[in-house]
Image (cartoon, grey):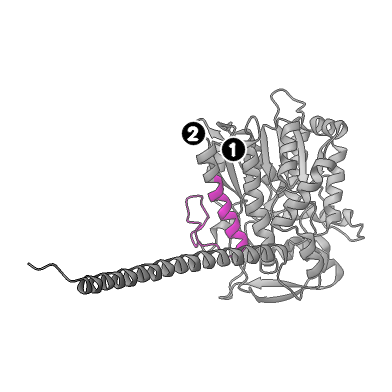
Amino acid sequence: MPAPSSSSSSLLDTGKGSKIERYNSYIRRVNSAKIMAASSKLLFRATLLTAVVLILLFTLNYPPLTTHSNAQSSSSSHRSLLSSSFLSSSSSSSKYSGAAWEKQVRNSAAPRRHNGMSVLVTGAAGFVGTHCSLALKKRGDGVVGLDNFNSYYDPSLKRDRQSMLGRHGVLVVDGDINDGPLLSKLFDVAAFTHILHLAAQAGVRYAMKNPQSYVASNIAGLVNLFEIAAKTADPQPAIVWASSSSVYGLNTNNPFSELHRTDQPASLYAATKKAGEEIAHTYNHIYGLSITGLRFFTVYGPWGRPDMAYFSFTKDILAGKPITVFKSQDGKEVARDFTYIDDVVKGCVGALDTAERSTGSGGKKRGPAQLRVYNLGNTSPVPVTRLVSILEGLLGTKAKKNVVKMPRNGDVPFTHANVSLAAHDFAYQPTTDLETGLRKFVKWYVGYYGIKSPVKNGGGGGHKE
């Protein structure tokens, strides 16, 4: 076979080179496309992440505009999740330090009875927190309070509660549950055996005006407290905390039982409390925290909350102003399981007394821990119109009533507590009927505000200070 000529060899080499060049060019285009696609995906993800972070920062730090007359002052007073943490963390190290302050904390936390508890009470200048702190201190337990004194309602009432507690030897620290360094400092100074966690953003309707405050307090604050209790406190304290009857939401089974479904919240407030119960389950399961949740049913009494109906009704009736009384969407009377403060205090103390020790240490679970939830109610629903009639009789004044249908803002038309579980586990037994409880409240109210008004049928109640 003749050998190929030089010209034919040159043509073959040229053809091969052309094919190789086209192949390399194709590979370069494919690789370039892959790099561009990967870069686009990375850029998209980075942009999306940045947008989410910016939206979160804006949402948490800038509540929505509102036409409410107190919107500006209210939104600034409720510390957002980020601002409260940053501001409190930067100031707590300097504000809450020194031998004198630590001595105050230790003295207040020290029990005065044999086997007494040392309890950190959050929300101590609140309605339920004040009464529980005083009851615990009077029986010889050590108590240190924590409260941020926000202006959801008149802070001067909270300051007066703080002063009353101070006269009984209870120190109430001005601070926020989102302030991790402050909480860590408190647990470093005092070995609390229990936490009674009552700090929360309360109210159903207010959630439509300032939803961020509920997330910051009822969820972020709860997580922060659980984190410190699980990983920093030594020993881990047992925790009793305030959930709410609002978790029953759209449940129609009566009376409300702990076994009933709670996955249909009717308000953001209820949703945050339900979320709190799930978060409690998580920290119990992972870290061995002993946790008891208490579902309060419409608590009332002396030193109460001004945003509650019985309180605002009393104020407006005495001032000759009309009051708004709701009826349900189908025209039925709205009823509540009104529970007197002294009965609720007994329930809180009973839960503390029967709380078992946490089983973890240093963020590690050593064994199964107690996890409970209880209703604390009066078991006797009363129509709101009946509440108004009782107040009219006690104040000697007829109310100017505007009866309207309940707006669809998260409120429910009826609550009724089944307390058999609490009765079985720590002998909870409410004993105060609505008329007796309101008589005690009205006597405190006219005395506290210095009102010259007859209170029918006399009757004492509440703490005179």
Q: How many numbered discs? A: 2
Residue 329, given in percent of the width and then of the height, sits at: 58, 75
Q: Which mark is residue 368?
A: 2
- 328 displayed left or right of 75: left
Q: What residue sits 77% from the left and 54% below the top? A: 304
Q: Residues within 10 Å of mark 1 (few under 14, many from 20)?
A: some
Q: Which residues are magenta?
A: 251-280
Q: CA distance from mark 2 to mark 1?
A: 25 Å
Whether residue 224 appears in this view of the structure is yes
Q: What residue sits 61% from the left and 41% below the top? A: 428
Q: Say whether disc 2 or disc 1 marks the residue closer to the N-terminus.
A: 2
Element at badge 2? loop
- 21 displayed left or right of 113: left
Whether residue 351 appears in this view of the structure is no
Eyeballing the image, is 61 above or below 463? below
Image quadrant occupied by the C terminus: top right
Residue 274 part of the magenta-drawn span: yes
Element at badge 1? loop
- 249 displayed left or right of 240: left
Q: What residue sits 58% from the left and 42% below the top? A: 292
Q: Residues within 10 Å of mark 2 (few under 14, many from 20)?
A: some
Q: What residue type is disc 2 on?
A: Pro
- 234 displayed left or right of 124: left
Q: What residue type is disc 1 on?
A: Ala
Q: Which mark is residue 427?
A: 1
The image quadrant of residue 59 is: bottom right
Residue 333, given in percent of the width and then of the height, sits at: 61, 69
The image quadrant of residue 164 is: top right
